Image: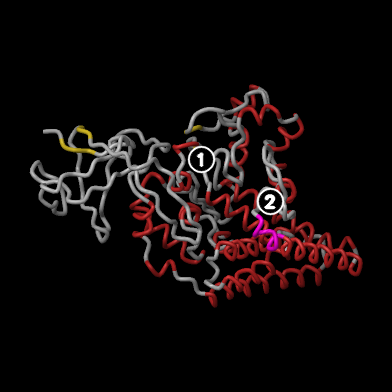
Amino acid sequence: MASWVLTECGLKPLPRIFPRLRHGLASNSSFPSEVRPLPIFKSYRLVSSLGVSSGFRGNSWALNVSAPLRVTSVGEGDENRERDSGVNGLEDEGEFDPGSPPPFRLADIRAAIPKHCWVKDPWRSMSYVVRDVVVVFGLAAVAAYFNHWAVWPLYWIAQGTMFWALFVLGHDCGHGSFSNNPNLNNVVGHLLHSSILVPYHGWRISHRTHHQNHGHVENDESWHPLSEKIYKNLDNVTRTLRFTFPFPMLAYPFYLWGRSPGKKGSHFHPNSDLFVPNERKDVITSTACWTAMAALLGYLSFAMGPLQMLKLYFIPYWIFVMWLDLVTYLHHHGHEEKLPWYRGKEWSYLRGGLTTLDRDYGIINNIHHDIGTHVIHHLFPQIPHYHLVEATEAAKPVLRKYRREPKKSGPLPFHLVGTLIRSMKQDHYVSETGDVVYYQTDPQLYGPEASKASK
């Protein structure tokens, strides 16, 4: 006999005359006393301070008959609970569709993460700041002491990587995962980000927009896809620079001043479209801190000589920029299989977050504070970085194929350079129509031979 199954059409509440379901398989004579739709769920508030709705369609529910389907307990304490859906292709056999609605809710992922992973320890967070600042000044002292051509290239790579580590700690301040004290977060965030020429509040607000709209074609803020119309309207120089390695890896300072193609505004201007009126004072504060740092660098260039400052600060700064662009790009691009982008009613906070990618950076994982554990970070940005690995492991049984296991790195993540170049040759624009879209390739950008070679 066919058994009841929930589909995207929705669900009507079951009559209460059915007996309560025991843990295990559903029989012909018993139905769940409480049934929740699998791929559809009501709006709820995100764990973090950001109020984000799930974005799924309303409560128009219906019940359908299908082939036999196992129905399991909906008890919150059952760690081995499984959810099956007849429309999402997540069964052990059959093709998996990454663009299908997941058979779990954001609350299911949260419930799988141990409670201590949510605890923020400001002393532990500050210990990472002290560690990184000591390393930064230590590297500069060693390089200045030896002042030898064989030392400087090693210093530039190491110091640029440490600048990137400072950015990640400031990034935690922006999310509130550094501590529960907003004043501490803002002070530390300003000191760290201003030191590497990032306007803290301007970045924090736009980055919040990125998290709230991740995976949305038009509303995402960071490395979002260009529509076909915008792409074809780019001048040849802009189009070539945007998709030709290594130029996109130098984009971040320009993005701070002018955002991405198709968007207007600046992270420095309080009246930018990025900000609402009550955020303008914060933006002015951050721009003033950035200006003070720029003035300090100008003074040091005069006092120490521009060549010395070029070697000590400005070359490492551009190495940091390359790290930032590399990591942020690859967390949203470059998977072997095309991943969806959403718009309209198909987008939700959960589905958008599940298009992000975890990456393994080898020994750099510890240096840049496990930012490669990106899926859980995107869904729950208030989890401190030192709990992200454990939280990811705990969530794996729930996420299943919706989390793509990253390719194991060697000591240094050289394998990601090939992934980056391949993506830039393939991921150019998305269609103007459709609520679930995938990147398309412009075969004329590099010529037909280059297009074939990238496949």
Give whichever of 250, 155 is nearer the camera: 250
Residue 76: horizontal and vertical position, in percent?
Answer: 27, 59
| Boundaries of the magenta span | 277-283
Q: Which residue is drawn at 14% across and 33% down?
A: 2
Give whichever of 382, 12 is nearer the camera: 12
Residue 45: horizontal and vertical position, in percent?
Answer: 43, 56
* Label 2 vs 1, first from the N-terminus: 2
User: Which element carries disc 1, helix, strand or loop?
Assistant: loop
Q: Is residue 282 on the magenta stretch? A: yes
Q: Which residue is drawn at 21% across and 51% down?
A: 34
CA neighbours of label 2 inside 10 A, class few (<14), some (14 to 19), many (20+): many
**Residue where numbered disc 1 is placed:** 335
**Residue where numbered disc 2 is placed:** 322
CA neighbours of label 1 inside 10 A, class few (<14), some (14 to 19), many (20+): some
Residue type for callout 1: His
User: Which element carries disc 2, helix, strand or loop?
Assistant: helix
- On screen, residue 9 versus residue 120, left or right, reads left
